[in-house]
Image: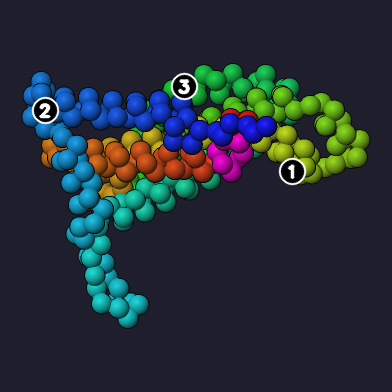
Amino acid sequence: MTLPKAAPRWVQPVTALRIAIIVTVLASWEALAASGLLYRDVVPSLLAIGKALFNLLTVPDMPVDLSRFGLEDTKIPAIYWHLYVTFYEIAIGMVIGGLSGLVAGIALGSSRLLRQAYEPLLYYLGPCPKIIFFPVMIMWFGVGPGSKVAMGAISCFFPVALNVAGGMREIDKVLIRVGRSFRANTWQMVTKIYLPAMRHPMINGIRIGLGVCLIGTLLAETKLSNSGVGFLVIQAYSLFNMPLMYALLIVLFVIAIGANALIGRFGGLDDIKRS
């Protein structure tokens, strides 16, 4: 007796539905661009966006000084420098905000007094748009990358702290009693019991924190900056270069998907969803 072979991955119902949605969205976009219902170039054609994306990634328009390495000066596409600036700000913001949120979440989850005193404040401040703090960040950290890092850190802090605090409450009390019966110190409790037991809530908090950190950093770059992807987006918008603006958004979209998938793979969440 032979079992029927599973259908190829690309013809699975979920994959087919995803492909159908993407094709429908692209066809609707192209139809809207050709209809002339909106102002000219507000919705550019897919060909125009593709050409702008190709030029964005391949046309060298930024000089690079390599004389200190004994090499001749060259040019690279400017997008790579601006991506580096944005990635640097997001990475530092994620480290600061993520670690701060982790410490705060563990403290709130392990102490009833701290939880009752401070967790409501996190719930009240969490939904507030963090861009309202940007003028304060400018006064504290200046107009350079410091204020953008601070925006990313404060955006990342709240989802990580709230998810970790919730994960702490879901830890099996037996595990905590076992750790205390072996007289484990605070560091051992955190590394041997707390973190392994709440891996999934912590990873979920990091995934959400990455998204809001990206939003906060890019918003800060659009407000006051001379480098970064956010600066390129607002510059393209100011010049009404819509194909370039959409090309930049596609780059950000692809990078965000890749980073989110990488974090999910690291946390093992994708395997859980498949099972």
- Amino acid type, residue under disc 1 in the picture: Thr
Give the number of the disc on residue 34: 2
In the image, is residue 129 part of the stretch drawn in magenta?
no
Give the number of the disc on residue 127: 3
Task: From the viewer's side, name the closer residue of 232 and 108.
Answer: 232
SS under mark 2: helix
Residue at screen point 44% across, 22% down: 128
Q: Is residue 259 visible?
A: yes
**How many other residues sit within 10 Å of disc 1, few (<14), some (14-19) or many (≥20)?**
few
Task: From the viewer's side, name the closer residue of 184 and 49.
Answer: 49
Q: Is residue 185 above or below residue 41?
A: below
At which x and y percent is residue 228? 31, 48
Q: For marks 1 and 3, give the CA distance.
A: 30 Å
Q: Is residue 137 visible?
A: no
- Quarter holding the C terminus? top right
Q: Of the residues under marks 1 and 3, which one precedes in the sequence?
A: 3
Q: For marks 2 and 1, give the CA distance.
A: 58 Å
Task: From the viewer's side, name the closer residue of 216 and 112.
Answer: 216
Give the number of the disc on residue 232: none
Give the number of the disc on residue 191: 1
Q: Of the residues under marks 2 and 1, which one precedes in the sequence?
A: 2
SS under mark 3: loop
Task: From the viewer's side, name the closer residue of 213 and 251.
Answer: 251
For the record, the magenta segment spans 264-271
Which mark is in front, 1 or 3? 1
Q: For marks 3 and 2, give the CA distance.
A: 39 Å
Q: Residue furthest right?
A: 181
Q: Of the residues under marks 3 and 2, which one precedes in the sequence?
A: 2
